[in-house]
Image: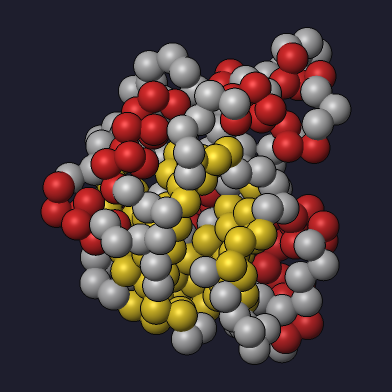
Amino acid sequence: MIVTFLGTGTSQGVPVIACNCEVCKSTDKHDKRLRSSIMLQDDDGTAVVIDTGPDFRYQMLREDVQRLDAVVFTHEHKDHIAGLDDIRAFNFKQQKAMDIYATERVQEALRREFYYVFTEFKYPGIPQMNLHTISLQRFSAAGMNFTPIEVLHYKLPVLGFRIKDFTYITDAKTISDAEKEKIKGSKILVINALQRQSHISHFTLEEAIDFAQEIGAEETYFTHISHRLGKHADVSKELPKGIYLAYDRLKISI
């Protein structure tokens, strides 16, 4: 299975258009971060995306994705759901509704944000979705097995997911000991590292490093990165062995 990092950035701390910080001016492709999302692709071509942020359409076009079987959501914040309308292209190409996996709370948000999808009288061409309710129990999406991991994004419960020996978590600030047990043994861990400064709802770089070392995965990648963290090349020099900054379009095998 191949994991593609569609985006490794965040709306937190997004600069204004005229920003002249070193990250925004950088010509290094590793510093060009779209909103965080990953795509899982099996050997048979089956593809599942975790989160459809505002950059979803561009991410799909950039990666030339011709098939998408399901979408799984971590939580309902706009930087993780805003691009969902653009599944309609896959509806048209594949001639079927898209399977959407989300908690009841996230589904309520989807019904509010994309109300026109769920009205009694549907406009031709709107996105077609099959909603599947998930909780903390293991589930299967497009034949891939997911183990949900609940983390707290300040006080909001957010789901991370373990697939095989790969664990993907964004928007975490605190993780209980019970949920950590689900993560331990992962060979590859992806966790958020927003910035250096303290933040109410995200791991800082220091907190992310501490968590990575506690879990002890063979490889850890940081995602959900603000421009405030600094340039990819500079931050990478500071990281302990086996810990890396992820970047858009990075592909890893799990």
Q: Looking at the picture, how far across and down is residue 67, in whole percent?
A: 71, 79
Q: Decide if residue 99 is on the left or right side of residue 65.
A: left
When the figure is inspected, residue 240 is found, relative to residue 78, above or below; the finding is: above
Farthest residue, direction left: 178
Can you give x and y, in whole percent of width and height, for residue 142 in the image?
51, 83
Residue 212 visible within the image: yes
Toward the viewer: 86 or 197? 197
Q: Residue at x 48, y 66 (%)?
A: 72
State the residue in front, 193 or 238.
Answer: 238
Which quadrant: the N terminus? bottom right
Q: Residue at x 74, y 14 (%)?
A: 22
Residue 115 visible? The answer is no
Q: Is residue 169 left or right of residue 184?
A: right
Vertical placement of 155 versus 110: above or below? above
Image x and y of residue 228, in percent: 58, 19
Please give the name of the residue rendered at 78% of the width and 53% of the height, measured from the top-left corner.
58
Picture residue at 82% right of the left edge, 67% below the top: 64
Q: Does 45 sit above or below residue 227?
A: below
Task: Write down the quadrant of residue 45 in the picture.
Answer: bottom right
